[in-house]
Image (cartoon, coloured by chain):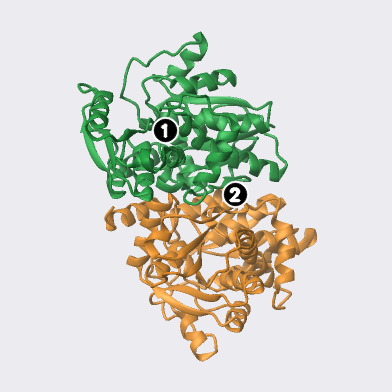
Chain colours: A green, B orange
């Protein structure tokens, strides 16, 4: 985070060139059964199909690329419960440098396993009693590794924005003009990057951030114009979206773009997981399905909307619970 | 099946225009983890993301379109355990005509439910004791409905071929030239259509049909040059691929194209289902994963290959079994 500038569309375009060799250009589905369920024209950006199963690889790879050979020489450190961990671990593997991940002990098993598979070292901590930032700072001090923040970093935000660039290019190709974007929101890096890219091409698009019920730091922060924190740090199935408060850069961008935020419950997210699995044949984790959950709860007849499915790393027991809870 | 001509690339192009309004242009994934697992460059055509969850909608819709308003006026009949049933039922719904599906009583529950959801009437039969073709013929005689064969129909084969046209267009765009296609094979309609479309663009591509172990009618038929039957009609988890024998038209095409056939076991298919779910985040049924299962069993280092995932309508208990049987 040496560089605190606010990223713009040029940064996103450069990031797209940087990540092109290793990132999947994920599909934007259209003409799915969601059109009939909603009465809208729904475009679905499929980030579960991204390398490591979520959009996080985009930002991580861009950040490591921008560090340069010297900046990566002593390895990298990240604090993450899962998707950012996997993104950083895989980017580090591709760049041939070491990754250390500070991860809560209660992170989903699939995310821990996959982070280890990319060769990263995991340092577990207790969410309730330990200070993860202090642990990460200690590793940086001891090793000289570079700290890759999950969202409060212009390089990470520009990387996430490449998903928005792909959406905009595909909509242009199809001649479609979107009215609204529904996008999952934790720290706000994804929504900031994708929002920048889409607003650049479609000046009138509305931006709806979707947060877990009880973790509506963005909603409250946007309302008062300053960054507020959540009162809790766990207790939602949408584990991918539990950032303690908006990132400074992402908040500035989302606020400038006029984004607003809505929340979804665990039950609504599970229903969206079941619909994504049964109707779209995609594995989507609860946090990754938050945008879809919000979209399904609104009257969008006649509108053209984009929804980002942001990640697919679901514990299989949670998928079973989602399928059990929703009638076929 | 009034028209018995052998379809060609022009028929496939016309079918593509016909189905464009309602069919999903499914993604061709590249740069996935399959590249690392195989050492090959693997392109993955994702037909689980097609409307109704399998490629069958393509052929069904094209066949109903070609029937014309009068030809559809008395409804349509199909014999199918599932994916063709859903394709025909959904196409009939879109054309505003009635569909009757003759379906084995042991068809997967998800396929029966979804066929009913599209408004079709289901006539169950016992695979062991009843003659499904006679039942269908009786319905045709009684109602004047048109019989839509699952594979032995030029309109159906041309419709399935549109998946191949999409693959060829996307490979052209990327400048990639494929060495080999791996594709699931039951009656051979999909492989015939996709084979035609790919061979038209890539004259040197090899065509590998993939059948269930114990149901290798295509392998034996291609060897002797005439159509042979399977000795059994059930007893495989790859329920989508259990046609009793090659279709006449599809066999002629596959033979002319020089296709060869390999088989995969239930266990190999389940492993491919688990890999598709965990690594690609896609719901793929055992028959739909047959091509992937075969691909994973071969040495393809340095090659460029295309695999078609043909359907995603998996019973959730079967997915659980696949995930349980394969270590994470």
Q: Quadrant of residue B72?
A: bottom right
Q: Is residue B320 visible?
A: yes
Task: Give the label on residue B118, or none.
Answer: 2
For disc 1, the marked residue is A287
Question: Residue A250: horizontal and vertical position, in percent?
Answer: 49, 24
Query: Which element is circle 2 on?
Result: loop
In the picture, which quadrant includes the N terminus of chain A?
top left
Find the residue positioned furthest to the top: A224
Q: Is residue A234 left or right of residue B118?
A: left
Q: Nearer the viewer, residue B192 or B215?
A: B192
Q: Nearer the viewer, residue A308 or B283?
A: A308
Residue in the picture at 55% in, 30% down? A182
Report the chain holding disc 2.
Answer: B
Q: Are marks 1 and 2 in contact (CB under 8 Å)?
A: no
Q: Is residue A225 left or right of residue B3?
A: left
Query: Which element is circle 1 on?
Result: helix
Task: Give the label on residue B106, or none.
Answer: none
Q: Residues within 10 Å of mark 2 (few under 14, many from 20)?
A: many
Report the chain holding disc 1.
Answer: A
Figure check: A153 above or below A61: above
Do badges 1 and 2 share one subunit? no
Figure check: B162 above or below A217: below
Residue at mark 1 to residue at mark 2: CA–CA distance: 31 Å
Question: Residue A220: horizontal and vertical position, in percent?
Answer: 46, 13
Total marks in image: 2
Question: Residue A277: horizontal and vertical position, in percent?
Answer: 46, 45
Q: Quadrant of residue A173?
A: top right
Closer to the camera: disc 1 or disc 2?
1
Q: Residues within 10 Å of mark 1 (few under 14, many from 20)?
A: many
């Amino acid at each position: 985070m040496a560089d605190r500038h606010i990223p713009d569309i040029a940064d996103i375009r450069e990031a797209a060139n940087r990540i092109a060799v290793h990132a999947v250009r994920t599909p934007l589905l259209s003409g799915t059964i969601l059109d009939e369920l909603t009465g809208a024209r729904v475009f679905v950006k499929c980030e579960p199909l991204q390398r490591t199963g979520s959009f996080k690889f985009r930002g991580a790879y861009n950040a490591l690329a921008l560090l340069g050979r010297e900046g990566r020489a002593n390895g990298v450190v990240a604090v993450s419960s899962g998707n950012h961990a996997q993104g950083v671990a895989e980017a580090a593997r591709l760049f041939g440098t070491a990754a250390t991940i500070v991860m809560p002990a209660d992170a989903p098993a699939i995310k821990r396993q996959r982070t280890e598979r990319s060769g990263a070292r995991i340092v577990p901590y207790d969410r309730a009693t330990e200070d993860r930032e202090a642990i990460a700072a200690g590793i940086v001090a001891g090793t000289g590794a570079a700290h890759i923040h999950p969202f409060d970093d212009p390089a990470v935000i520009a990387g996430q924005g490449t998903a928005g660039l792909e959406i905009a290019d595909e909509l242009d190709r199809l001649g479609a003009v979107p009215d609204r974007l529904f996008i999952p929101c934790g720290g706000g890096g994804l929504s900031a990057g994708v929002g920048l890219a889409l607003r650049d091409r479609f000046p009138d698009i509305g931006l709806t951030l979707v947060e877990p019920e009880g973790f509506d730091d963005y909603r409250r922060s946007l309302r008062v114009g300053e960054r507020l924190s959540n009162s809790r740090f766990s207790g939602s199935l949408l584990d991918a979206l539990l950032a303690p408060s908006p990132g400074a850069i992402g908040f500035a961008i989302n606020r400038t773009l006029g984004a607003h935020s809505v929340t979804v419950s665990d039950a609504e997210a599970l229903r969206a997981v079941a619909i994504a699995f049964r109707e779209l044949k995609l594995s989507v984790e609860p946090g990754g399905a938050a945008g879809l959950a919000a979209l399904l709860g609104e009257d969008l007849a006649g509108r053209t909307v984009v929804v980002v499915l942001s990640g697919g790393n679901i514990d299989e027991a949670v998928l079973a619970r989602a399928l059990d809870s929703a009638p076929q």
